[in-house]
Image: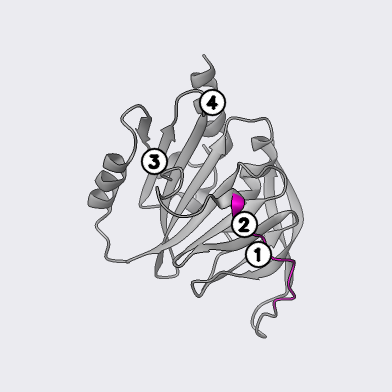
Amino acid sequence: MKKCTALAMTLLLFTSLIACQSGPDPREVEKPAKSEQVPDQSQASEVEIEVILEGMSEKEKAYFTEGTMNYYMYGLDKFTLVSEEPGKDILLTDYDSDFFVRIEKLDREANIPAFKEQLRQSLSSTWTIHDLDPKELFDPYFHDAQLYLLVETPAPQQTNLLYVVKDIDKQRFLFTFHLPNKETAEGIIPRFWAMLKTINH
């Protein structure tokens, strides 16, 4: 029953490998102090972005934030973008350190079916994998994604992993969500989606 509830909650909210098996635990990555990152003249230093919470649209202030792979986004308060390792950034939140999104760039010519199969083989056989239609994602902005996999891990982890591959301005990104089955998900996950929509490069 708990497993079904976890899947239902995930699909309602949006309808990584836990990390790469090597590399640091994202929750242990040292977060830098807030820096005064300066955008060029074509970019605003802060904007208001739309966040959908419990079906209601709200506007929240977000701030220019640079990634380490020649892209930028707008980050909300209590969320931090840091480098995990070369070629991988992590979007963390102060609300609950168990939630995060890994951001990677992929080759635009990458074979998506082959990539999907590689992901499947790298995941534990005890995990349940759902190969879903991107049009089931909560936000229409992501309906043209090339990949949408939902992975359920068994107890005691009770964590959902979500893989989304999307092209943004001719660059292919892989987003890997680490989403524990906690009540705090209702306020965190919609904000992840809202911030990822602002990515540009």
The residue carrying mark 3 is 149
Category of crowding for the residue at label 2, using alpha-carbon neighbours closer than 10 angstroms: few (below 14), some (14–19), many (at least 20): many
Majority SS type along the magenta span: loop
**71 vs 118: above or below:** below
At 62% from the left and 61% from the top, the residue drawn is: 81
Quadrant assignment, res 124: top left
Q: Position of residue 183 (x, y in %)?
A: 68, 30
Write down the region rendered in magenta: 28-37
The residue carrying mark 1 is 74
At 41% from the left and 35% from the top, the residue drawn is: 151
The residue carrying mark 2 is 195
Contact (Cβ within 8 Å) of mark 3 with mark 4: no
Query: Label 3 vs label 4: CA separation?
Result: 15 Å
Query: Label 3 vs label 1: CA separation?
Result: 25 Å
Please, what secondary structure does the residue beneath circle 2 have?
Answer: helix
Query: Label 4 vs label 1: CA separation?
Result: 29 Å
Q: What residue type is labelled 2?
A: Met
Left or right for 105, reference 29? left
Contact (Cβ within 8 Å) of mark 2 with mark 1: yes
Category of crowding for the residue at label 1, using alpha-carbon neighbours closer than 10 angstroms: few (below 14), some (14–19), many (at least 20): many
